[in-house]
Amino acid sequence: MPEKELPDWTKFGREVRRLRSQAGLSLSDVSSRMNISIGMLSKIERATRAPKRDTVGELDRVLCTNGSLMRRWSDVNRKVADPDWYRRVEDAEAAAVEIRLHNPTLIPGPLQAPEYTREVLNYGRPLDSDADINALLELKAKRAERALSGGDPRLTALVPEMVIRDCVGSPKTASAQLRHLVDLQESGKVTMYVIPRGVPTHISLSTGSFSLISFVDRMPTVFVESASGGELIDHPPREIQRFVSVFGLLQGWALSPADTLGLIREACHGFSVE
């Protein structure tokens, strides 16, 4: 019985075949230069087998593609791995004019520095392989890049003081994260408000981590994030208003952007980095 073609990998397989033919190499030639059988290479080209990251890295080297195959692999792998909710979030954020972020326990995702994100993922997903973690890092980095690209959407974030002063990972990682926040605030890419200690931030524990995504032509949408994924909420209006009210209440208690910047700088000095 012939093996079933994997539609998501068809274009990738054709591109591998095209590059191999363009280089004047046979299946045997490529196989002999890397750790893969002729049969497996043929399956990748026919899209009956999804390639692994290490294999694509070797193909990049043998076919001299300067990383283009790896980028294609990442795009396809993301499409295959992304749940439907993530694609819906991407579409919503692309159409947004404003995104308001709040996480009661961590720096909001788009504002995280890479090593901070890695620490969070390593602790929160102990069963994932390094390849899985790297794929998630790439996914989150692309989301952050879109959100911080300038212009729409405008980005606003509420961050509890406890989260600013908490040491996630090493002092070096924590310090780098705070410097990243300072850079973002100074660049105008995001407006941050620190919620000082003493404010009853526990009111947001009932909502958890969320993003309020606002548009020109329709009601806001709420993205509620969890350890295992997320959910987009666009009805009923009363439920949306609950998140709007929580965000507004916390923002009313928060420090000004200027005082927020001063507190983050002061907290950064509190981490001794060798």
Image (spheres, rainbow, N blue to C red):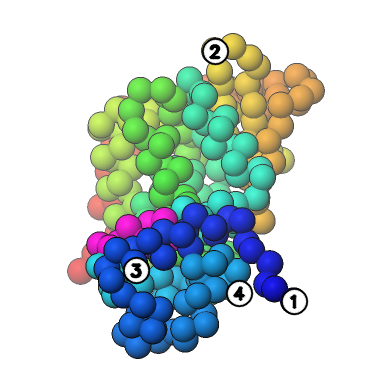
Work out how far the residue at label 3 is from the one at label 1, CA to CA, in angstroms: 27 Å
Q: Earlier in the sequence, mark 3 or mark 1?
A: 1
**Is residue 145 shown above or below 272?**
above
Which amino acid type is marked by label 2? Answer: Val
Q: Nearer the viewer, mark 2 or mark 1?
A: 1
Crowding near the residue tagged with mark 2, few <14, some 14–19, many ≥20 C-alpha atoms within 10 Å: few
Disc 3, SS: helix
Q: Which residues are magenta?
A: 65-73
| Image point (65%, 16%), residue name | 219
**Do we see residue 108 in this rendering?**
yes
Q: Nearer the viewer, mark 3 or mark 2?
A: 3
Q: Which residue is mark 1?
A: 1
Q: Which residue is mark 4?
A: 127
Residue 207, numbered circle? none
Q: Earlier in the sequence, mark 2 or mark 1?
A: 1
Q: Which residue is mark 3?
A: 20
Which amino acid type is marked by label 3? Answer: Arg
